[in-house]
Amino acid sequence: MTVTEAPNVAGAIETIESHLHPKPSFDLADHPVPTGREEVWRFTPLHRIGALLGEGPDAGAVAVEVEAPDGVRVETAVRGQSPRGDVLVPGDRTAALADSAAAEATVVRILANAELAEPVRIHLTGTDASARSARVHVIVAEPHSKATVVLRHTGSAQVLENVEIDVRDGANLTVVSLQNWDDDALHAGEQTARVGRDATYRHVNVTFGGSVVRLHTNLYYEGTGGDAELFGLYFADAGQHLEHRLFVDHNAPHTRSNVDYRGALQGKGAHSVWVGDVLIRKVAEGIETYESNKNLVLTEGARADSVPNLEIETGEIAGAGHSSTTGRFDDEHLFYLTSRGIDPVEARRLVVMGFFVDIIRRIGVDDVEAGLIAEVERELAAATVGAAPAASVEE
């Protein structure tokens, strides 16, 4: 067991004993090159992401464009300059490399009491699949602000990326992270949020593109009454490795979290990994939490790994639970649709679309929702879906 450190309610550092969370540190020496035997790396194809694990400068092969409406201030911050580093301390080697290689961070500050009618848009465009780049973004939602930030990744690239999100007291922030990379992209990212007193935070992760994408999504609380929802979608095609790791640290009483991630896989060698961990500390009385992961395996040769974890240190809670389901189409659902004259291919399309749309409709940005529905349609149009059903496995 290693020791992990995370801020507690008072902002000090408190240790956690967990093999799932190596000690966070800005010092690269504290994050040796992984061997694959570590718990946090055992699912990751290290032979495919070697380019992301070595030291080196930022090659500048990723362009960043920010569109910000009134009520937003865009700044930069160097290493050691607040608010950079106030929320996120690198939890693994790729996050430490991102911090060390990115000379400047893009800081997006939503001003106090501002209510944005349009989302802030941060667009990363990769221009060279053979060059490695590092990017750091800091999103600050000042007290009682309300905003949506859309972070979009496109193009070809090798990217190390940190995103730190500070949701201050009474703020209401939605962050949508879209990974629409080209098929040759490599992406390792850590996105960590601190949720203030009576603040509301929604995070949506959507990963359809990339050769290997490995994302950490973390959150902790800075006061009571914080409410967080983490939603995710991923669609892995032949040869893709899409890995999502989540850590919800209930380190304050009377806080709430809900995690709902859904994925589909098709094609030989398609591989998805979802690891969700919720820690309920001794001080976190009266909290409520639930995490769920569902996977649809559409063809032979695809594999979904799903690992929910729940660590409870106090019994004085309102509720806690988790679930994981992986399987093929329900044969009864298909029979019901085809018996009413619906073509089998169309029936499968309807089942998969319904599986995803429930999450898509929660995003709240019309053009993003429409784009994702179109992307799911394109994925399904390219699929050769086998008809043989298999029993699902639930935990």
Image: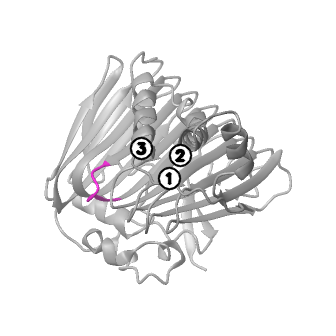
Q: Earlier in the sequence, mark 1 or mark 3?
A: 1
Quarter of the rendering occupied by the N terminus: bottom right
Residue shown at 60% from the left, 37% from the top = 354
Residue shown at 56% from the left, 34% from the top = 357
Q: Residue 186: say if magenta.
A: yes
Name the amino acid type tagged 3.
Ala
Tell me residue 18's x, y (percent): 62, 72
Classify mark 2: residues with Cα within 10 Å, few (<14), some (14-19) or many (20+).
many
Tell me residue 246's x, y (percent): 55, 56
Task: Kindly identify which residue carries mark 3.
Answer: 381
Name the amino acid type tagged 2.
Gly
- Between 210 and 364, the one nearer to me in the picture: 210
Disc 2 and disc 3: Cα gap in Å? 22 Å
Tell me residue 360's x, y (percent): 53, 34
Q: Earlier in the sequence, mark 1 or mark 2?
A: 1
Identify the mark at residue 217; answer none if there is no mark: 1
Disc 1 and disc 3: Cα gap in Å? 30 Å
